[in-house]
């Protein structure tokens, strides 16, 4: 039997890059990673960002002080929410100073009923936790939310690390989100939530009077999720033409419809930033595809460190693009491969390819410390005597339009925190954001990328 050897050409020699390159591309940081035309100041009332996602690792050194632990709510474990970061022995949630007089649900019967229940639940004297139910905010659930929160509002800090010798030393963690002055309210929901849970999440964003709402994922609404089946055929007929959607029951349809209207209502008062999707969707995923010139919903696509649209990001119905990672693709629409990969084999790769557009740069963000995070850890516990055992698991590679949308939410927050734009309404905030954009790309495709000062720069360009 003859052994066939395959000659691989990838060198796996990747360029080094600044972990905060995405902030330089957005013009938020200048040379030496110093603020570009703004300065961090103590805020009497920090800009508030409602992040509707998973929970986050609130003890991460770079997130201490960034996440409002009194207002953050878990809708995963209890129908009307649990306050996971309040002490278990605390008898009441206290006075939350909410926007009790909101009319955001007017004309939406199911939402009005939920709002009444919710207000009663959140009133002074209510218990922080649901009876006998633990909040679902363990490290195993918190990866995505931790990375998102870090991109939005992480703060540079000095922590303490315990060496193998047992000695403790100070260690600088100079990582920063776009707006290190903001306040994040984490609203965690089920991974596959029903419309009622999401209605409550957006109602809560309204009740806490958030300045920006960030929704860095999609909603699986059966009435609005359109399968991307056009590329698949059966006997020469597009599969999209051979199937039809089956509607859910009437009550469910009404709830899903109210959710869509509620998101638009919320966006009139404050920008709602949404990830546009990672499967090259034709018109972005839902609810990003609700974005229009008449509302404050902002659909965010991804652009890589070379200034090209990331391979997984769509281009239509997207408001703005922001830095993120890239991904390999090999299909009939595009061939974009990583020629540095040790597994790269040029055999069968067409001469007319887009390999030159691929960027190996990732976005770096905060991670759940210890073994439960994206990066993992050799230690079973993240800390030793309340100090870091290692710092590798505290950060990870991240990407997708989720990362891009988090950067845009932080960008808007920074505008309010520095007085550059008051974000007075969702539509005005969206108009201001578009006004900061520069067109990137060739004649066949123009991508709108915001920049705080000057024009966007891309560190992986040759």
Image (cartoon, grey):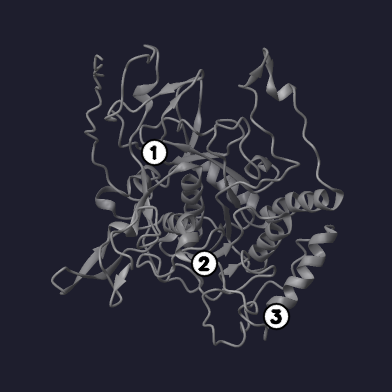
Residue at image mark 2? 137
Give residue 26's position: percent from left, percent from top: 40, 45
Residue at image mark 3? 123
Disc 3 versus disc 2: distance between alpha carbons? 23 Å
Give residue 40's position: percent from left, percent from top: 37, 64
Residue at image mark 1? 456
Q: Are marks 3 and 2 in contact (CB under 8 Å)?
A: no
Q: Quadrant of residue 124?
A: bottom right
Q: Quadrant of residue 304?
A: top left
Seen in the picture, residue 307 relative to 86 is either above or below; the reply is above
10 Å neighbourhood of mark 1: few (<14), some, or many (≥20)? many
Mark 3 vs mark 1, foreground winner is 3
Quadrant occupied by the N terminus:
top left
Q: Quick one: SS at disc 3?
A: loop
Residue 175 seen in render: no
At horizontal 51% and vertical 24% (from top left) the residue drawn is 445
At horizontal 62% and vertical 40% (from top left) the residue drawn is 285
Quadrant occupied by the C terminus:
top left
10 Å neighbourhood of mark 3: few (<14), some, or many (≥20)? some
Residue nearer the viewer, 289 or 42: 289
């Amino acid at each position: 039997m003859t052994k066939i050897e395959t000659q691989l050409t990838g060198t796996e020699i990747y360029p080094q890059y600044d972990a905060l390159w995405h902030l330089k591309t957005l013009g938020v940081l200048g040379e030496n990673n110093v603020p570009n035309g703004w300065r961090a100041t103590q805020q009497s009332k920090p800009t508030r960002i409602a992040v509707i996602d998973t929970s986050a690792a609130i003890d991460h050194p770079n997130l201490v002080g960034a996440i409002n632990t009194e207002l953050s709510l878990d809708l995963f474990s209890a129908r009307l929410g649990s306050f996971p970061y309040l002490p278990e022995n605390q008898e009441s949630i206290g006075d939350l100073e909410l926007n009790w007089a909101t009319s955001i649900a007017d004309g939406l019967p199911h939402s009005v009923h939920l709002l009444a229940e919710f207000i009663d639940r959140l009133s002074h004297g209510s218990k922080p936790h649901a009876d006998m139910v633990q909040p679902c905010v363990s490290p195993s659930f918190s990866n995505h939310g931790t990375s998102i929160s870090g991109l939005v509002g992480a703060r540079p800090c000095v922590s303490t690390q315990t060496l193998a010798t047992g000695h403790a030393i100070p260690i600088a963690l100079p990582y920063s989100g776009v707006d290190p002055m903001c306040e994040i309210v984490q609203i965690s929901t089920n991974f596959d939530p029903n419309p009622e849970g999401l209605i409550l999440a957006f109602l809560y964003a309204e009740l806490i009077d958030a300045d920006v709402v960030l929704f860095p994922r999609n909603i699986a609404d059966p009435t609005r999720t359109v399968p991307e089946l056009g590329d698949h055929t059966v006997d020469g007929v597009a599969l999209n033409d051979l199937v039809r959607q089956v509607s859910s029951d009437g009550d469910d349809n009404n709830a899903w419809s109210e959710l869509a209207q509620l998101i638009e209502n919320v966006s009139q008062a404050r920008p709602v930033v949404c990830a546009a999707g990672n499967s090259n969707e034709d018109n972005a995923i839902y609810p990003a595809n609700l974005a229009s010139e008449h509302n404050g919903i902002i659909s965010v696509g991804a652009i890589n460190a070379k200034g090209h649209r990331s391979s997984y990001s769509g281009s239509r119905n997207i408001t703005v693009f922001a830095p993120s990672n890239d991904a390999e693709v090999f299909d009939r629409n595009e061939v974009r491969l990583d020629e540095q990969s040790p597994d790269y084999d040029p055999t069968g790769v067409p001469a007319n390819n887009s390999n030159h557009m691929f960027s190996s740069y990732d976005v770096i963000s905060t991670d759940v410390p210890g073994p439960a995070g994206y990066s993992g850890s050799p230690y079973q516990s993240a800390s030793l005597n309340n100090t870091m055992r290692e710092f590798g698991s505290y950060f990870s590679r991240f990407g997708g339009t989720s990362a891009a949308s988090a950067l845009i939410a932080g960008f808007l927050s920074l505008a309010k925190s520095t007085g550059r734009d008051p974000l007075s309404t969702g539509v005005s905030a969206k108009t201001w954001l578009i006004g900061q954009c520069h067109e990137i790309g060739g004649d066949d495709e123009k991508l709108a990328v915001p920049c705080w000062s000057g024009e966007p720069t891309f560190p992986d360009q040759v």
